[in-house]
Image (spheres, rainbow, N blue to C red):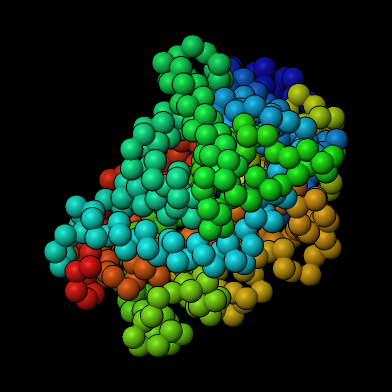
C-alpha cells in the first residue's frame, strides 16, 4: 500500500517488494539478467528497485546505457560507489581513492604502456606460459581426458597475465607466496563488502594483511629495479609506470605503482578467466569450430604452424569473432553503478531521478535483445562475419569523439554492444584482453579438440555470487590431443 500511495509521479516505477530494506536484493542477486528482462517487460526500460536499502534506478537498452555511461561528472559519480569496496583492496591514492582527474591520468599511464611493442612481446610470453602449463598440469596427461574449465582457466590466466603485464618477478612469486595473498585479497570483493567494507570480519582482516604485504612486495620490486640491479629487458607495466609522471611533474610514488598493479591484476584476472572459460565451454558445444579455427591458423601461418605473433592475430578474424561473440552473451560485468549527484531528467520521459538514487546500467541487456541481434540466445561467432573489422572496437565507429586524457572515446554511443563500457570509465584493458584471450585460444586450438561429455550441446548456468559473473563450477569438458604430447 505504501508503495502505491506514496508513488511520486516524476519518479520511475518501483519494483514490487515485501521486505523494506532488502527489497529486491535477493532476486536481483540470484540472476541479474532475469531480473532486468522480467522487469523491463513489466515496467519498461527505466525502473527503480531496492538494493540493500538503496533506491537503485535501472536504465536499459541503448538510451539507458548512454544516459548512465556517458553521464557528466557533475551528474554521476563512480568513486562514491566503488571506493568502499575497491580502496581496501587496491590501497590508497589510486583508482577510486583519488579525484577523478587523477584516475584519468592513471588510465593514461596504463593505456600508453600497452604499446604495440609491449603487446607483441606479450603474445610470445603468453604462448610460452600456456605451453608450459599444459605440459605440467595434471589434467593434461596422456592423449585424452577431462578438465574442470573454470578452475583450470583461473589458474592459467593468472600465469599468463602476470608473466606479461606484471613482469617476471611477480610471475615467479605466483609459484609460491602470491597465490595465497591474491586469494585473501580477492575475498575483499565479496558483495557483502558493499555493506560492510571495514567491518572487523575475518575475511576483511585477511584482506588488509594481504594488501599490505602485496604493496610491500611490489614496492620492493620497484626499489630493486631502480637500484640498477635488474636489467630493463621487458615491456611489463611496472617498468612503464616507473617512468611515468603526473601533469604536475611528480613521478608515480611506489605505493601508487603497487596499487595500480593490484588494480590491473584484479580487473584483468576475473574478466579474462571468466571469458576464456566461456569461450572453451561454448566451443565444446560446437566442436566443428575447432576445425575451422585450426584451418584459419594454417591459412594465415602456413601448414607447419610456426609460433604465433601479434601481427598474425589481426589476420585471424574468426579467433576475434569467437571472443567478441562470447563477450556479447557472457560479459563478465553485468551491472555498472553510479551515484546520482543532482536531480536528473531522463530525456523522452517525465522522470526526474533524485540525488539520493544510485543508477545502474547493464549493457549486457541490449547485447541480448532480439531488437538488436537475430536469435540473441544462439552463440554464433559467424554472426559477426560481415562487420568484425568495423565493430572490433566500438570507438572506431563514426561517433563524435571526446578526449578524457587517456584516449579518444565516443561522446555518446548508440551501440547495443558495449562489453567494455563507455565514457570516462570505459575499459583501457580491451586490447590486452583481446591479445590474451586470442593467444590462449590459438594455443588451445593447436593442442586440443574439446567437446561436452557425451557430445551434449548443453551449457552450464552462470554464477552471479561474486561481482564478476562466471560459469558455474564444476563445468567439465572432454579433451583429445591433436598431436603428440608436449
Ligand atoms: C573498466 C570490462 C579487462 C582494466 C571496465 C568497464 C568494463 C570493463 C565494463 C567499465 C566499468 C564502469 O564503467 O564502471 C572488461 C572486460 C574485460 C576487461 C569485459 C575482459 C574481457 C580488463 C583488463 C584490464 C582492465 C585486462 C587491465 C589490464 C580496467 C580499468 C577500467 C576498466 C583500469 C577503468 C575503471 C574506471 O575508469 O572506473 N572494464 N574489462 N580491464 N577496466 Fe576492464
Establish if 309 lies above or below 122: below
Quarter of the view holding residue 51: top right
Q: Answer with the quarter of the image where residue 79 lies.
A: top right
In the picture as drawn, the residue positioned furthest to the top comes out as 200
Q: Residue 326 in the image: x percent, y percent?
A: 48, 61
Residue 323, percent from left and from top: 49, 64
Q: Seen in the image, is 284 located left or right of residue 124? A: left
Residue found at the very far front of the displayed protein: 228
**Residue found at the far left of this picture:** 142
* Residue 472 appears in view: no
| Residue at left offset 52%, top offset 13% | 199
* Residue shown at 51% from the left, 65% from the top: 121
**Residue nearer the viewer, 28 or 18:** 28
Would residue 151 be visible to someone looking at this image?
A: yes
Q: Where is residue 486 in the image (x, y as percent from the top left)?
A: 23, 68
Instruction: Give the side of residue 420 with respect to residue 343, left or right.
Output: left
Q: Position of residue 11 (x, y in %)?
A: 77, 31
| Residue at the spot 45% in from the left edge and 45% down from the top edge | 169
As drawn, 482 above or below 162: below
Above/below status of 484 relative to 187 = below
Front residue (pair 142, 486): 486
Q: Residue drawn 37% across and 58% down?
A: 129
Looking at the image, how many numbered discs can be counted on the residues? 0
Lateral position of residue 171 relative to residue 331, left or right = left
Depth check, front residue: 441 or 351: 441
Above or below residue 49? Residue 475 is: below
Amino acid at each position: 500500500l505504501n508503495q502505491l500511495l506514496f508513488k511520486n509521479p516524476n519518479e520511475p516505477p518501483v519494483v514490487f517488494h515485501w521486505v523494506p530494506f532488502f527489497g529486491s536484493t535477493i532476486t536481483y542477486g540470484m540472476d541479474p539478467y532475469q531480473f532486468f528482462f522480467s522487469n523491463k517487460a513489466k515496467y519498461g526500460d527505466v525502473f527503480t528497485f531496492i538494493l540493500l536499502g538503496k533506491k537503485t534506478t535501472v536504465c536499459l537498452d541503448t538510451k539507458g546505457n548512454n544516459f548512465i555511461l556517458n553521464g557528466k561528472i557533475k551528474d554521476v559519480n563512480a568513486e562514491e560507489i566503488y571506493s568502499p569496496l575497491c580502496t581496501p583492496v587496491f590501497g590508497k591514492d589510486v583508482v577510486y581513492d583519488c579525484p577523478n582527474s587523477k584516475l584519468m591520468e592513471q588510465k593514461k599511464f596504463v593505456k600508453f604502456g600497452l604499446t604495440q611493442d609491449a603487446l607483441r612481446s606479450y603474445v610470445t610470453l603468453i604462448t610460452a606460459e600456456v605451453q608450459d602449463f599444459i605440459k605440467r598440469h595434471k589434467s593434461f596427461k596422456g592423449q585424452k581426458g577431462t578438465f574442470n574449465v573454470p578452475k583450470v582457466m583461473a589458474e592459467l590466466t593468472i600465469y599468463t597475465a602476470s608473466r606479461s603485464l606484471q613482469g617476471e618477478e611477480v610471475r615467479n612469486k605466483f609459484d609460491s607466496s602470491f597465490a595465497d595473498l591474491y586469494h585473501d585479497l580477492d575475498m575483499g570483493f565479496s558483495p557483502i563488502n558493499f555493506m560492510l567494507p571495514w567491518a572487523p570480519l575475518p575475511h576483511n582482516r585477511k584482506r588488509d594483511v594481504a594488501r599490505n604485504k602485496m604493496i610491500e612486495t611490489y614496492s620492493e620490486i620497484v626499489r630493486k629495479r631502480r637500484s640498477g640491479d635488474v636489467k630493463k629487458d621487458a615491456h611489463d607495466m611496472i617498468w612503464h609506470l616507473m617512468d611515468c609522471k603526473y601533469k604536475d611533474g611528480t613521478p608515480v610514488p611506489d605505493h601508487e605503482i603497487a596499487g595500480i598493479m593490484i588494480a590491473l591484476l584484479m580487473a584483468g584476472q576475473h574478466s579474462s578467466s571468466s571469458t576464456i572459460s566461456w569461450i572453451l565451454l561454448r566451443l565444446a558445444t560446437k566442436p566443428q569450430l575447432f576445425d575451422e579455427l585450426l584451418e584459419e591458423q594454417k591459412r594465415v601461418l602456413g601448414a607447419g604452424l610456426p609460433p604465433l605473433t601479434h601481427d598474425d592475430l589481426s589476420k585471424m578474424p574468426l579467433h576475434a569473432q569467437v571472443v567478441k561473440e562470447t563477450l556479447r552473451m557472457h560479459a563478465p560485468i553485468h551491472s555498472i553503478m553510479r551515484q546520482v549527484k543532482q536531480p536528473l531528467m531522463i530525456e523522452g520521459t517525465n522522470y526526474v531521478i533524485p540525488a539520493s538514487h544510485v543508477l545502474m546500467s547493464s549493457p549486457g541487456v541490449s547485447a541480448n535483445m532480439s531488437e538488436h541481434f537475430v536469435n540473441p540466445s544462439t552463440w554464433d561467432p559467424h554472426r559477426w562475419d560481415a562487420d568484425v573489422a568495423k565493430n572490433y572496437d566500438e570507438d572506431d565507429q563514426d561517433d563524435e569523439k571526446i578526449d578524457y586524457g587517456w584516449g579518444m572515446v565516443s561522446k555518446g554511443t548508440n551501440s547495443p554492444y558495449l562489453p567494455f563500457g563507455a565514457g570516462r570509465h570505459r575499459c583501457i584493458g580491451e586490447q590486452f584482453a583481446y591479445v590474451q584471450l586470442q593467444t590462449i585460444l590459438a594455443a588451445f586450438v593447436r593442442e586440443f579438440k574439446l567437446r561436452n561429455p557425451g557430445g551434449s550441446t548443453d551449457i552450464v548456468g552462470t554464477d552471479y555470487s561474486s561481482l564478476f559473473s562466471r560459469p558455474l563450477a564444476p563445468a567439465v569438458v572432454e579433451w583429445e590431443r591433436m598431436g603428440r604430447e608436449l
